[in-house]
Amino acid sequence: MVSPLDRKLLRDLWRMKTQALAISLVVAVGVMLLVMMSGLVNSLDETRRAYYERYRLADVFAPVVRAPDRVLTRLADIEGVSAAEGRITGSALIDMPGSDLPVQARAVSLPDFGQPRLNAVYLSAGRWIDRRRSHEILLLKSFADAHGLEAGDTLSATMHGARRSFEIVGIAQSPEFLYTTAPGELVPDDSRFGVIWMSRTAMEAAYDLDGAFNEALLDIGREEDLPSVLAAADRILDDYGAVGAYGLADQFSNRFVAEEIAGLRASSAGVPPIFLAVAAFLLNIVISRLLQAERQQIGLIKAFGYTNSEVTAHYFKLILTIAAGGAVLGYLLGLAAGAALIGVYVQYYKFPFLVFEIDPASFIIAVSASVAAAAFGGLFALRRIFALTPAVAMRPPTPPDYSGTGRFGGLLKRVLDQPTRMVLRRFVRHPGRSLGAIAGVSAGMALSAGMMTVLAGFDEAVETTFSVIDRSDMSVSFIEPLPDRTLHALAQLDGVIEVEASRTIPVILRNGVHSYRGGVSGITSSARLQRAVDANGQALTLRGDGIILTPALADILQLQTGDRLRADIRQGRRPQLDLVVTGIAESLLGAPSYMELSALNRALGEPNRVSGAYLRIDPLRRDAIYAALDAMPTVAGISVKQDAREAFQRMMDNGAGAMRFVMAAIAALITFGIVYNTARIAYAESAHDLASLRVIGFSKGEAAFVLLGELGLIVLLALPAGAVLGYGLSHAIAAGFSTDLYQVPAIFSPDSLGVAGLAVLAAAIFSGWMVKRESDRADLVSALKSRE
């Protein structure tokens, strides 16, 4: 049997259905964001773990120049190592029909019989290679899809200076190539980098490594001491040109996938709570004012003998229904949005299967936050009402004393008409209500401004990286460090306008307990095409005894300008350098470091050597330059800046960066919800007053002006407050979106503020039109009989 209070609850919900729905939708979008992002993190993390486990991705990678196979026995004997395997890898250039620009690729050996013990391959189409047929290969699926290649097709590639033709017999995927980029680049482009798997016998012949390997893979247990295993592997491989063993955490593909998941986890921990807090704040204000309006009914209910606990439970059900309804709706929307977005991530990171997992804790947190915020506002209002006796509560509140709020007299009384004075009186005589409404609307604008800032920040990251820092047209990498006279050969090519030397070497940078494994880029002190620039875009000066770090790298190493660090060079004589940090360079992509090229060569004992070059070319001679570079046996790879820029833009728009558009849409929805709720609440509280104005002779327009004038004043005051709040919020949101792969600057531009302000004004105009239409249609008699 339904109790009288429950029937009242149903009637109240029906009476305020529009307002309850609007509040629920605001809660729903906040919950949706939380559930969606936490689901993405859990699903990606679990899918990655399962993929690595099923295909036995190695825990340790140890590249060398050349080591005999017998060394594997010594590696397998290292304490903690459960499996050791050697393989051959090498660079290749694939010639694609119809294109003069060769595509960079990596060739990897497979055992002559069956799958490797470590780093197994997932065969998605075709068949396994036959060791007796050296021209058979497996091709990376993403590259094959990008070029429309399939099993049975052929391609030609240059390996170790020799051009060969191959038959594609299978299409494959591997957990070590989830994130694939061309050497020297950070942004993946499926069409510009491929992976070829060949039999061990064929690879030995192609790279002249008969009976030897150039990369060892080790598997260790989870409880084993990784640093000890790395040190032992380095000692064994030191005589074979080792450049330093490293763990899975430093493996290129896993590193970026892990950083993406970590960045997404940080965003899910930082950004949704901001949205949810704004939604909860609004819910708090709405419930407080709603219960204040229910004052007379509460007094009447108490007069009928209901206790404070029963009345509290009744209104708590009302709060719970609205908040929980929004939370459940948000949860369902979050599941749908997460399932849609996880497909984007899975496709982007080349997972062959999906393990979709939602964290139930996200739903509990979202519902708890929503209900707690609403309950806080409701209980605060109820507490004041319960302090009154039923008889007092049933009467309208005593008219407040406005004698201290000042009067409109003199000039103001002559300048302002009566409706305008009424608007101002309503505003100044309820300062708490007015400030609450301003705070709510400004919070909504701050969300929109913050998201607009993030959108502008992504554009700034692209522009700074590809126009200010890198001013070349293309870059060339060599198969090994070459004498700098090679640059003269490049400069002689018809169409090459400018050539600039570079050398990149692997290095471990250390500062006490902080370390970073990466590369240091040697550039000339007068570099023009690839520069180290400060935050203002001005070139930084390189010193012979110094190194320039980027903000992300300086943060990892806990260093600043003037500090010193230890650089363990992992190439050549492998010297250890004591360097001073001479500057912090702006970089929004990756975490590079820079040294003066001649100083780097002196440290290596290899003067006048380069490993690559940046070129500025005549666009009209581009195809001829591509063909000439393709014919050079010393060229290992060619990277065109425009292609890299377009790949980065695609990643931002269609890959991981697409999340910013989702959040921007949610911010806009919440902003509209806040403004609309503010208008609805104002109308609900003023319905009786507006009907009275109509009865005493005010026109519909004048009565609506009194209502909408107050809303307009609130919105106008909220705009500057929202701009200030948005400034701080934009930094928090930009930090939440930044990862080690890319940093999103907080670009607080007038455009962002303008768009966010226009969004608030548009929402206010639409909401005002909605409530005016309802006010015009209102039954005056019913409105005058309505509760205060």
Image (spheres, rainbow, N blue to C red):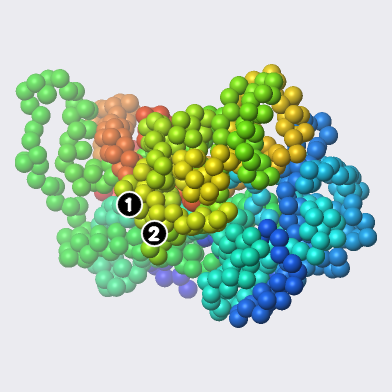
- Look at 25% across and 27% down and name the residue there: 697
Q: x%, y% of residue 612?
A: 61, 39
Q: x%, y% of residue 587?
A: 46, 41
1 or 2: tag closer to the N-terminus = 2
Q: Quadrant of residue 668?
A: top left
Residue 644 disc label: none
In the visual, does 174 lie left or right of 784?
Answer: right
Q: x%, y% of residue 623?
A: 74, 25
Furthest toward the right, the residue is 132
In this rendering, the answer to whether 56 lies above or below 403 is below
Q: Quadrant of residue 177?
A: bottom right
Crowding around mark 2 (Cα neighbors within 10 Å: few <14, some 14 to 19, many 20+) is some
In the visual, does 398 lie left or right of 759?
Answer: left
Q: x%, y% of residue 11?
A: 42, 57
Work out whether residue 211 can be spotted.
yes
Residue identifier under label 2: 511
The answer for how far apart the CA atoms under marks 1 and 2 are is 9 Å
- Look at 73% across and 56% down and name the residue there: 89
In this rendering, the answer to whether 442 lies above or below 388 is above
- Look at 31% across and 48% down and name the residue there: 562
In the visual, does 761 lie left or right of 389?
Answer: right
Closer to the camera in the image, 146 or 722 = 146
Residue identifier under label 1: 563
Do the residues under discs 1 and 2 have CB atoms within 8 angstroms? yes
Secondary structure at numbered mark 1: loop
- Amino acid type, mark 1: Asp
Secondary structure at numbered mark 2: strand
- Amino acid type, mark 2: Asn
Closer to the camera in the image, 124 or 775 = 124
In this rendering, the answer to whether 474 lies above or below 588 is above
